[in-house]
Image (spheres, rainbow, N blue to C red):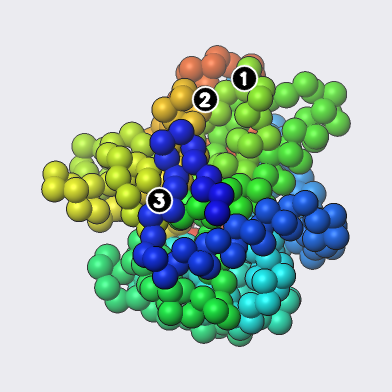
C-alpha cells in the first residue's frame, strides 16, 4: 500500500481492521487517476452537474476599499453552494468503481453532508451522515437538506458534539461496514490515502484559477487566500500554485474568541504535533496531550487539527497561516454582502477578513485571489444572532 507522506506528516495510524479497506481504496484511486474513462466522467459531471468552471469575479468596491485588485474564486456558485461537491462526486465515483453500495460521511457546517447526500442521490448509493448535535442545532437548514436528499443523519451526542466527534463515529462505523461501505472523508485529512484523494479532486479550484488569470492576460496573482479548518478548499487552491514561488499562499485559521482566550481553532499557530483520526499533524492539545475543545463562529472551521499537507506547507515556509477571530470574520461577511451583493459563508468570511494582514505584508496595488469556499445561506441563523438590522 502506498503511504502518502508530507514531510513527517500524514501516514496511516489506524486499527488493523482498516488496513485492508485503505489498501483497497489506495489501489482504486491510483488506478482511477490513470483511467481516461474515469477522469472523463468526473470532468463531465463537474461541467454538466456541478456547473464548473466557477467564475473568477473581480470585486471593484472591495478593491477600492483595500487599494488592491481583489478577485473571488466563486465556489459558492457550485451546485449545493460550496466546494465540497467536487470531492464528493469524485469519491462517490470511486465508491461505485469499488462496488460499494453505501457511503458515509462526517460533517460540521453541513455542506459536506449535503454534498455527500447529493452525490449519493445522483449515483444511487445509500447514505448516512454523522453530525454533532451542537452543529446540527446551528445548521438546521443543512440538516433538513440532507434528509430531503434521502440521507440518514446520525446525530452524535458524545464529546463536544461537533465535527471531531462526528469524525470519530464515522470511523467506527466504517470499521464495522467496510465490505459494502465507502467513507467519503470531507477534508484534506485522515489516514493515507485520503489527504491525497481530496487534494486531487479539489485541485480543480487552483487549476481553474490559474487558467482564468491567463485568460485575463494576467500572469498570476501575487497572493491567494483561503480559510483552513481541515483544509480542503485551501489545498485545492494552493495546489495550482505550488511551483510558482512568487505567488504567496495564505491560509486562515479560526481565531474564535482570540488566541489568548484559548477558545479557538488554530492548530498550526497554537497547536502541538500528534496523532488523531489516523494521521500525524498539528492538533489542539492540552498539557497532557488530550485533544482540547475548540471554538469558532463557523461550524466548518472548528476541527481541532489540520490536514498533513498544510502542516508541511507551514513548516517548509511555502504557505503562511494567519489567524482571524469571530468578530473580524463576521464584519467581513457583512462588508462583502453590502459592498458587492455577495453573501459569503462564515468559513469564507475568515479568508476575506485576512485581507488587511495580507496587504500589510505584500503591499497595496497587488492582485489577490480570495477563495470564496461557500455561500452564506446556511449561516443566516448565526448571523442573525449577531447583527441588528
Instruction: Give neighbour class at mark 2: few <14, some 14-19, many 20+ (Cα, 10 Å).
Output: some
As drawn, 367 above or below 350:
above
| Mark 1 vs 2: CB contact within 8 A | yes
Secondary structure of the residue carrying numbered label 3: strand
The alpha-carbon separation of the residues under discs 1 and 2 comes to 8 Å
Secondary structure of the residue carrying numbered label 1: loop
In terms of sequence position, does the residue under pointer 2 or pointer 3 come before the other? 3
Q: Is residue 24 left or right of residue 354?
A: right
Question: Who's the residue at 56% across and 42% down the image?
Answer: 234
Secondary structure of the residue carrying numbered label 2: loop
Tell me the number on the disc at residue 318.
2
Q: Position of residue 111 (x, y in %)?
A: 55, 64
Residue position for label 1: 245
Residue position for label 3: 279
The alpha-carbon separation of the residues under discs 1 and 3 comes to 28 Å
Choose mark 1 or mark 3, whichever is in front: 3
- Seen from the viewer's position, the closer of residues 144 and 219 is 219
Residue 350 seen in the current view: no
Residue 239 seen in the current view: yes
Amino acid at each position: 500500500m502506498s503511504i502518502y507522506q508530507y514531510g513527517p506528516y500524514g501516514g496511516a495510524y489506524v486499527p488493523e481492521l482498516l488496513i485492508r479497506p485503505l489498501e483497497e481504496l489506495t489501489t482504486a484511486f491510483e488506478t482511477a487517476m490513470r483511467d481516461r474513462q474515469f477522469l472523463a466522467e468526473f470532468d463531465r459531471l463537474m461541467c454538466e452537474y456541478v456547473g464548473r468552471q466557477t467564475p473568477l469575479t473581480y470585486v471593484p468596491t472591495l478593491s477600492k476599499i483595500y487599494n488592491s485588485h481583489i478577485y473571488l474564486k466563486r465556489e459558492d456558485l457550485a451546485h449545493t453552494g460550496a466546494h465540497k461537491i467536487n470531492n464528493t462526486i469524485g469519491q462517490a465515483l470511486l465508491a461505485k468503481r469499488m462496488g460499494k453500495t453505501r457511503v458515509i460521511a462526517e460533517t460540521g457546517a453541513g455542506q459536506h453532508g449535503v454534498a455527500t447526500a447529493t452525490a449519493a442521490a445522483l449515483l444511487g448509493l445509500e447514505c448516512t451522515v454523522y453530525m454533532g448535535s451542537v452543529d446540527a442545532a446551528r445548521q438546521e437548514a443543512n440538516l433538513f437538506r440532507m434528509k430531503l436528499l434521502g440521507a440518514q443523519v446520525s446525530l452524535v451526542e458524545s464529546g463536544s458534539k461537533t465535527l471531531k466527534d462526528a469524525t470519530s463515529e464515522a470511523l467506527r462505523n466504517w470499521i464495522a461496514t467496510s465490505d459494502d461501505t465507502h467513507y467519503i472523508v470531507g477534508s484534506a485529512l485522515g489516514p493515507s490515502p485520503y489527504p491525497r484523494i481530496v487534494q486531487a479532486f479539489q485541485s480543480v479550484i487552483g487549476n481553474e484559477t490559474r487558467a482564468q488569470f491567463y485568460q485575463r492576460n494576467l500572469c498570476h496573482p501575487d497572493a491567494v487566500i483561503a480559510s483552513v479548518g481541515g483544509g480542503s478548499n485551501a489545498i485545492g487552491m494552493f495546489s495550482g500554485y505550488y511551483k510558482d514561488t512568487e505567488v504567496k499562499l495564505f491560509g486562515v485559521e479560526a481565531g474564535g474568541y482570540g488566541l489568548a482566550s484559548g477558545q479557538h481553532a488554530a492548530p498550526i499557530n497554537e497547536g502541538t504535533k500528534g496523532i488523531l483520526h489516523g494521521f500525524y499533524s498539528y492538533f489542539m492539545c492540552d498539557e497532557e496531550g488530550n485533544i482540547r475543545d475548540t471554538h469558532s463562529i463557523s461550524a466548518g472551521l472548528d476541527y481541532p487539527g489540520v490536514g498533513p499537507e498544510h502542516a508541511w506547507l507551514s513548516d517548509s515556509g511555502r504557505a503562511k497561516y494567519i489567524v482571524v477571530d469571530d468578530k473580524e470574520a463576521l464584519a467581513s461577511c457583512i462588508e462583502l454582502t453590502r459592498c458587492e451583493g455577495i453573501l459569503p459563508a462564515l468559513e469564507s468570511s475568515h479568508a476575506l477578513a485576512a485581507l488587511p494582514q495580507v496587504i500589510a505584508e505584500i503591499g497595496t496595488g497587488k492582485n489577490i485571489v480570495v477563495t470564496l469556499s461557500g455561500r452564506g445561506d446556511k449561516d443566516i441563523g448565526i448571523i442573525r444572532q449577531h447583527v441588528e438590522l
